[in-house]
Every structure is written in C-alpha cells, then in structure tokens.
C-alpha cells in the first residue's frame, strides 16, 4: 500500500515539474521571437551559420573588364582571343570604339601564328594574313537565339592607304540589346565556304 502511494506521489511531482518548465519556457520563446531570433528566411542572428573553413565571397568581376582594349601590337599584352585550329592562328581583338545603345562600334582583328611566344623578351609579334579569301564576322546572342545587323569587315590600311598585313577592321558592330553575345569570326574561301571558325564572348552593357 505504501509503495503504491509513493508511486502516485512521484507521478504528481513529475507532472508539476513539467508544467513548471513549460511555463518558464514560454517567456523565453516570446523574447527570442520578438528580438528577431528566428526570421522567415531561416537565418537567426543568435546562430552562427558560416562554416569556419568557408572563404569569403568576392565581389563579381565587372563583365566589361573581360573586354579591355589593347593596342594590338604590344607583344607583352597581346592575347589569343580567337584561335583558328586549322591554321594554328590567333587573333587579338582590339576595340577602336565600343558600341552603345545608339551608336555602332568598331574593332580590329590582328592575326598571328600561335607558335609565337607573345611574352618572349617583349618582342613584337609578326602579324600575317590568314589563308582565306574573306574574314567574316557575325554577332549572335545564344540565350535569345537571334543575331544582329550585319558587320562590315575589310583589310585594315596604313595611314598612307596601303594594306596593313595581318589586320582586319570590323565596323558597324551593333548589339540590338544588352546581354551576353558571341562574336563569331569565320575564315571563308573563294566559294564562300567556311574553312575555320572561332568565337569569343562579349558582355554588352547598353
């Protein structure tokens, strides 16, 4: 009889303690919620969500910085923007005038053999014409599936009007809208067939 009474008394004590704890927790939860401890996006200022080994994220690079101009003749700065594998040729794209929302742009293409070391002793690159009857340039926006107005391409000339070996001038470069574009350069033969193609990405910020 005594053991039964003791069990009943212990049960009552436990119930009382549970009720007391629930009562004490309620104000704490109210304070946390009022202080913004739990937010709708699941990030609490009371909790540390960053991994200790996680590197801080850097600011995204300016998309236009990928299209910085070079003079096209400085060997130390020339880059192989476009590579034509069949002829092992590189072409460096140099903006003469970048297009805007209202005005077309213009750039130069300088062709040189990829076998040359553009950083060797700072020596100037030797530019040469590609083995092609025509250098053709077109613009394409892959995300939208459309192109732009035709680009005019011709051999560049010296100040005296003579042809500038290895250089071609692309004019009337116009992007109909801002976004990611492909500048596609094709080398064509006399019949108009494409012998080689190379392309580069350009971010148009109009």
Image: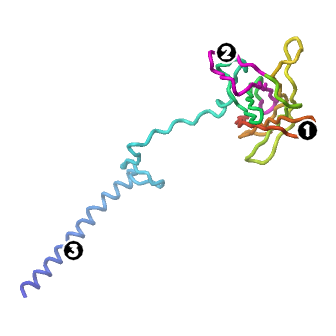
Q: Quadrant of residue 10?
A: bottom left
Task: State the residue in front, 74 or 205.
Answer: 74
Q: Is residue 100 magenta?
A: yes
> Counting other residues with Cα less than 10 Å from the Cα at mark 3, is it few (<14), some (14-19), or many (20 or more)?
few
Above or below — where is 131 with respect to 40?
above
Mark 3 and mark 1 lie on one chain; the one further toward the N terminus is 3
C-alpha separation, residue under disc 2 versus residue under disc 1: 36 Å
**What quarter of the picture does the C terminus occupy?**
top right
Q: What residue occupies the far top of the structure in this picture? A: 160
Task: Name the residue carrying label 3.
Answer: 15
Residue at x-position 20% and y-position 72%:
16
Q: Magenta part of the protein: which range? A: 99-127
**Main SS, magenta residues:** loop
What is the x, y in percent for residue 11?
Answer: 17, 78
Mark 3 and mark 2 lie on one chain; the one further toward the N terminus is 3
What is the x, y in percent for residue 31?
Answer: 34, 54
Picture disc at residue 192: 1
Q: Nearer the viewer, mark 3 or mark 2?
A: 2
What is the x, y in percent for residue 34?
Answer: 38, 53
C-alpha separation, residue under disc 3 versus residue under disc 2: 89 Å
Q: Is residue 113 magenta?
A: yes
Task: Name the residue carrying label 2.
Answer: 123
């Amino acid at each position: 009889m005594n053991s039964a009474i003791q069990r009943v008394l212990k049960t009552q004590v436990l119930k009382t303690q549970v009720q007391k704890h629930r009562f004490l927790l309620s104000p704490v939860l109210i304070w946390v919620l009022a202080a913004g401890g739990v937010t709708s996006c699941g990030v609490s200022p009371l909790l540390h969500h960053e991994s200790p080994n996680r590197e801080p994220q850097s600011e995204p690079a300016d998309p236009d910085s990928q299209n910085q101009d070079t003079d096209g003749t400085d060997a130390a700065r020339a880059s192989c923007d476009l590579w034509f594998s069949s002829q092992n040729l590189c072409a460096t794209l140099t903006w003469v005038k970048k297009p805007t929302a209202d005005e077309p742009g213009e750039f130069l293409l300088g062709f040189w053999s990829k076998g040359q070391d553009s950083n060797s002793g700072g020596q100037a690159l030797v530019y040469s014409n590609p083995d092609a009857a025509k250098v053709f340039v077109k613009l394409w926006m892959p995300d939208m599936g459309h192109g732009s107005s035709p680009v005019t391409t011709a051999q560049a000339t010296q100040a005296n009007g003579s042809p500038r070996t290895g250089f071609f001038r692309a004019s009337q470069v116009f992007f109909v809208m801002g976004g990611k574009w492909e500048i596609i350069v094709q080398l064509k033969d006399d019949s108009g067939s494409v012998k080689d193609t190379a392309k580069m990405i350009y971010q148009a910020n109009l």
